[in-house]
Image: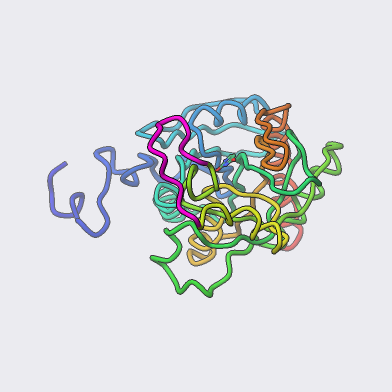
Amino acid sequence: MSDERTNRAAAPKAANEGVYHLRLREGDVPAYVILPGAPERTLKIAENWADVREAAFYREYKTVTGRYGGMWQAAASTGIGGPSSEICIHELSVLGVHTCIRVGTTGCITPEYDLGDLIIPVACVRKDGTSHAYIEPEFPAFADTHVVMALMKACERLGFKYGLGLGYTVGSFYIGQGRPLNEDYSGYWPSFADKIIPDLQRARVTNIEMETSAQYVVGYLHGMRMGAILSVIANRVLDRWGDEGGESKACLAACEALKILKERDERKS
Ligand code: URA
C-alpha cells in the first residue's frame, strides 16, 4: 500500500483503504451513529442491539454496529476531548454519516440535576479549543432541533427524567473545570479558577464536560445533524460523583432517538 494515492498527506488512507484513524470503509457504518467518548461504552450501547459486530478498533476509536428494533445503527467512540472528536466526525462524514448523537457524562453545576439525571444540551459555551481551528469564536455551538426533539421524545417514551441544558465544554478536566490539583501537591491554583463555576452558575449554565461544543460545531460545518445526551456523573454543588444508572439510560435513549429520526426522515422523503 505505498502508491501515491493511498499515502496522500492531505487525506491519508489506512492500509485497509479505509479512513485513516477509524479504519472503516464505505458501507461499514450506517448514516446514523451514536458517539460515546469511551471505547468500552460502544458495548454498553450494543446491549440494546441484535446482530452486534465490531467494525474496527484502532487507538481510541472503536466502532460497533448492530440492529435496534430492526434499524441498523453504529456506535463510534470519539476519545476524550475536541481533537479526537474532530477526527472521528470528519472521517464519519467521509463515509456518508449525516446524523450523530453524543452519549457522554457531565458534571452538573445547578441543584436542579442530580447523579444519574439526563441533560440534553441545546447549546454550549465553546471553551473546547478545537472548534476555534474551524471558525471564529463568536460562531454558536448548537444542537440540531430535530435531534433534540427526538431525544426528548425518546426520554418521554422510555420514562426517563431529562432536562434541556446550556453546557460549558472545556479542553481540561482539572483546572479548566475548577478542580484543584490536590493530589500532586503542586499547589498550582490560578486565581481565575476560583471564579469558573460561580461565574458559569450566574450565567445559568447547567453543566460542564469536554466534547460537546467541538462536536456540534465541527459536525454542523460538515453539514451533519448533531445532538447529545449526557448523564450526570458529578454533582459539583454537592461534591458527589457516581453513575446511578445514568449511562445505561443515556445509551438507550440515544438508540431510540436515532430510530425516531430515521422514521421521521423516511416519512419526509
Ligand atoms: N466529564 C467531565 O468533563 N467533567 C465532569 O465533571 C464529569 C464528566
Q: How many marks?
A: 0
Give the quadrant of the N terminus.
Answer: top left
Instruction: Give the magenta-colored segment's residue range.
Output: 180-191
Residue at x 79% of width, y 45% of height:
111
* Residue at the (53%, 62%) spot, across then down: 126
- Determine whether 196 is above or below 251 in the image: below
User: Residue 226 occupies which quadrant of the picture?
Assistant: bottom right
Left or right of 226 on screen, residue 150: right
What residue is drawn where x is 59% and y is 31%? 66
Does the image show residue 178?
yes
Query: Can you see residue 266?
Result: no
Toward which corner of the image does residue 244 lie, by quadrant? top right
Q: Position of residue 98 (x, y in %)?
A: 55, 56
Residue 107: give x, y in percent of width and height. 64, 42
Is residue 185 located in the magenta-colored stretch of the structure?
yes
Between 63 and 2, the one lying in front of the other is: 63
The overriding secondary structure of the stretch rendered in magenta is: loop
Which quadrant of the figure shows ligand 1?
top right
Would residue 183 be counted in the magenta stretch?
A: yes
User: Can you give x and y, in whole percent of width and height, for residue 204 in the image?
Assistant: 73, 60
Q: Nearer the viewer, residue 26 or 153?
A: 153
Quadrant showing the C terminus: bottom right
Asked whether, in this view, residue 84 is left or right of residue 110, the answer is left
Q: Nearer the viewer, residue 39 or 1?
A: 39
